[in-house]
Amino acid sequence: MPRPIHATIHTAALHHNLERVRRAAPDAKVWAVVKANAYGHGIERVYEGLRGADGFALLDLAEAERVRHLGWRGPILLLEGVFEPRDLELCSRLSLWHAVHCDEQIDMLAAHKTQVPHRVFLKMNSGMNRLGFTPQRYRAAWARLNALPQVDEISFMTHFSDADGPRGIAHQIETFNEVTQDLPGERSVANSAATLRHLGDARLRSDWVRAGIVLYGSAPDFPEHNAAHWQVRPTMTLSTKLLAVQHLQAGDTVGYGSRFTADGPLLIGVAACGYADGYPRHCDTGTPVLVNGVRTRLVGRVSMDMVTVDLTPLLDRGMQLGTDFGFGSEVTLWGSSSHGAVLPIDEVAQAAGTVGYELMCAVAQRVPVVVDGAA
Ligand SMILES: *Cc1c(COP(=O)(O)O)cnc(C)c1O
């Protein structure tokens, strides 16, 4: 028997979250962002739930090939564009649209031999200072691209640094609009946070929104808002089982470094999940977890293959060890328990000092994944 840990991908939740994005952006087309192997879910596993999108956006060419291999004939956008000249051959062959963010990429295009001109998204660095042409150089880049026979339609894109926070998007969108306002073509500016929080802003015209994290049921602006506020559902559940129960007395400690000491009699469970499964070692006593759908907390340190959980809340509900819970009971590290309760990934991420994005992406190879296809 393999260890009882597994991840479940919820097809119906992906579908629901995509519809949620459509409601937030009724006039825009939706790029489903599936970079990093669909935020750790697996491109092949999310395809059914997300195939209602207008296109798929990602940045690894091998992942783009996988999307085409699934039979997707619609748009695919390479968010970082190409890395070397031969990537353009793959773009031609698979008709991939690609971002153009630097002069080197224009040079590559100018030297590229293609029958069919490429659709490109010219990226502006409007303040994030990662990729893109500065506002001062943007129009010259556009003019250069526009003169190339290798280039078909040119669209405009930029990326927000603070769509989820107090600084907001005004400083970036004003620059972007000023520079692009009289240029012909589609615009793609909004990520998940901007789509949920700022689409009412009249300055923000996005013909294509780029929805990532919201599709996977995590709130882009947690803890200001949670997933329930945005009406999105978890698309990944990480669950396992109890493989032991220990009865502690006052003064007994738990796990490596004796980080937790019982101050009285305490029943704890040992669950088959550790940092080698991708569960963050930074989670410590207090991190939320569900046992048989009942919310409780981690106690002590996360080890490689195990975590320890406080079983007091189950006893408090009148549940009996041995009859109602014990060896083999379901433990939900994040996502939906089979008892109906939900533990948002964002709460676990917060306890680890990180974001839901990182936890999803970090689920280890050794964790078996099943797809729950029920609608
Ligand atoms: C990852 C990414 C997105 C999606 O971001 P979310 O916060 O997950 O919605 C959008 N645009 C670009 C350029 C990205 O790299």
Image: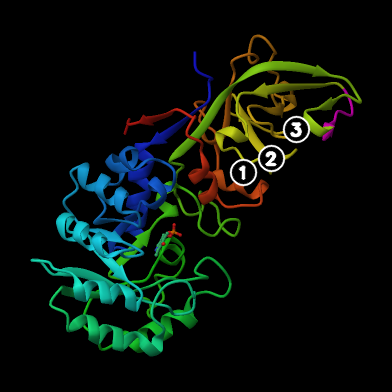
Q: Name the residue under label 1.
A: 348
Q: How far apart are marks 3 and 1 (CA)?
A: 14 Å
Q: Name the residue under label 3.
A: 299
Contact, mark 1 vs mark 2 (Cβ under 8 Å): yes
Ligand 1 sits in quadrant: bottom left
Q: The disc labelled 3 sits on which kind of residue?
A: Val
> In the image, which residues are magenta?
258-264
Which of the marked residues, 1 or 2, is nearer the chain's N terminus? Answer: 2
The quadrant of the picture occupied by the C terminus is top left
Which of the marked residues, 2 or 3, is nearer the chain's N terminus? Answer: 2
Q: Position of residue 55 (x, y in %)?
A: 25, 56
Q: Residue at x 54, y 45 (%)?
A: 359
Does residue 51 appear in this view?
A: no
The answer to whether mark 1 is within 8 Å of ligand 1 is no
Which of the marked residues, 3 or 1, is nearer the chain's N terminus? Answer: 3
**Of 41 and 316, the residue lying toward us:** 41
Q: Is residue 251 left or right of residue 271?
A: right
Q: Where is residue 141 in the image (x, y as percent from the top left)?
A: 29, 84
The answer to whether mark 2 is within 8 Å of ligand 1 is no
Q: The disc labelled 2 sits on which kind of residue?
A: Thr
Q: In this view, does 324 lie above or below 28?
A: above
The image quarter containing residue 183 is bottom left
Q: The disc labelled 1 sits on which kind of residue?
A: Val
**Of 47 and 151, the residue lying toward us:** 151
Q: Which residue is drawn at 61% across and 43% down?
A: 348
Q: Mark 2 points at which residue?
A: 287
Q: Distance between the residues labelled 2 and 3?
A: 8 Å
* Secondary structure of residue under mark 2: loop
Does residue 249 appear in this view?
A: yes
